Amino acid sequence: MATLGFVGTGTLADAVIRGLQKTEAKAHRFLLSPRSESRSRALAAEFDNAERADDNETVVAQSDIVLLGVLPKQISELGALPFRADQIVVSFLAGVPVEVLRQAIAPATRVVRMIPLPCIEFGKGPILMTPGDAEVETLFAGVGELVIPDQESDLDTISIASGLMSAHFQMQNTVVAWLQSREIAPALASRYVRSLYSGLGELALEMDRKGDALPPEEYETRGGLNETARAFFNNDGWFDDIARALDRVEAHRRTLMKPKD
């Protein structure tokens, strides 16, 4: 049994902990940072193998694998913590390169950068990580689809796609609202739409696992409903707008990652 130490117990760490507790990782000990106080206390009360430490120093000192869920601006505070050379450190710090983190947490050098999403709580969604690490891959294998690029720069590029997450939810909400405008009960409209997009996601993922393409024309009938909708979006340039939105996200992230004077 290993001790998994969480430095920072924010929303993402909460989702990671809940996801891991549904896998073989529940055999491990979970040692939680006291921040946030309410969330760490709630998790410790809910799970028998989770306990709340008095401070981050204790979390790091007693852990075999340290999972960092603090804000990137707090990286300077990590140097005061008692990291060891024999530890694995998994970083959720957005935009912080592996080498920068290694310098902050010396003498620890075995660092994995990871970008999980909130749906990890349900064992769903992609988990971006680099570099590959067999022990970390085993730990997270049951909570999502591991995506491990060879280059750290590829991780940064791939993660831009997650910038469409809130837009995806707005699209779902728009469809739900349209159904309601046709006098469909809100609960029925919502359940159908959420289930529809979840099922389509599973279908696409299974095709990807098989190495098959996903041509949209195979999921429409000539002159049918799906062809009508897709032709409308194509004629309106909607799919081109998605690519332009990703360009905008990419440019915006460059400005966020520029060092401040």
Image (spheres, rainbow, N blue to C red):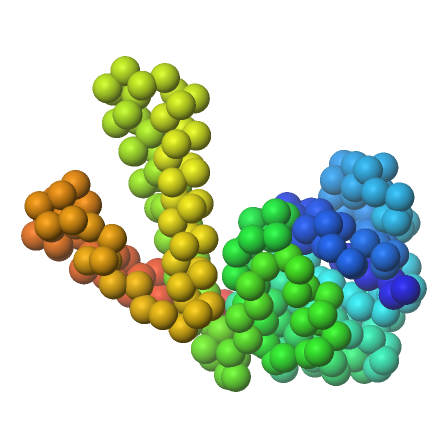
Viewed as shown, does residue 241 lie left or right of 177?
left
State the residue at coordinates (40%, 28%): 190
Instruction: Give how far across and how far down residue 51 sits, in percent.
Output: 88, 47
State the residue at coordinates (45%, 77%): 154
Up-down: is 224 above or below 218?
Answer: above
Quadrant of residue 116 within the rendered picture: bottom right
Tell which of 207 and 243 is nearer to you.
207
Up-down: is 202 above or below 130?
Answer: above
Viewed as shown, does residue 218 lie left or right of 76?
left
Q: How many marks?
A: 0
Viewed as shown, does residue 260 lie left or right of 180?
right
Tell which of 134 and 79 is nearer to you.
134
Q: Quadrant of the N terminus?
A: bottom right
Quadrant of residue 71 within the rendered picture: bottom right
Up-down: is 224 above or below 157?
Answer: above
Quadrant of residue 138 within the rendered picture: bottom right
Instruction: Give how far across and how far down residue 129 sits, in percent.
Output: 58, 71
Tell which of 64 and 58 is nearer to you.
64
Instruction: Decide if residue 49 is in sight here.
Output: yes
Instruction: Give how far across and how far down residue 18 sits, in percent.
Output: 71, 47
State the residue at coordinates (80%, 68%): 65
State the residue at coordinates (82%, 75%): 87
Instruction: Decide if residue 76 is in sight here.
Output: no
Instruction: Give how far across and how far down residue 206 sits, in percent.
Output: 45, 61
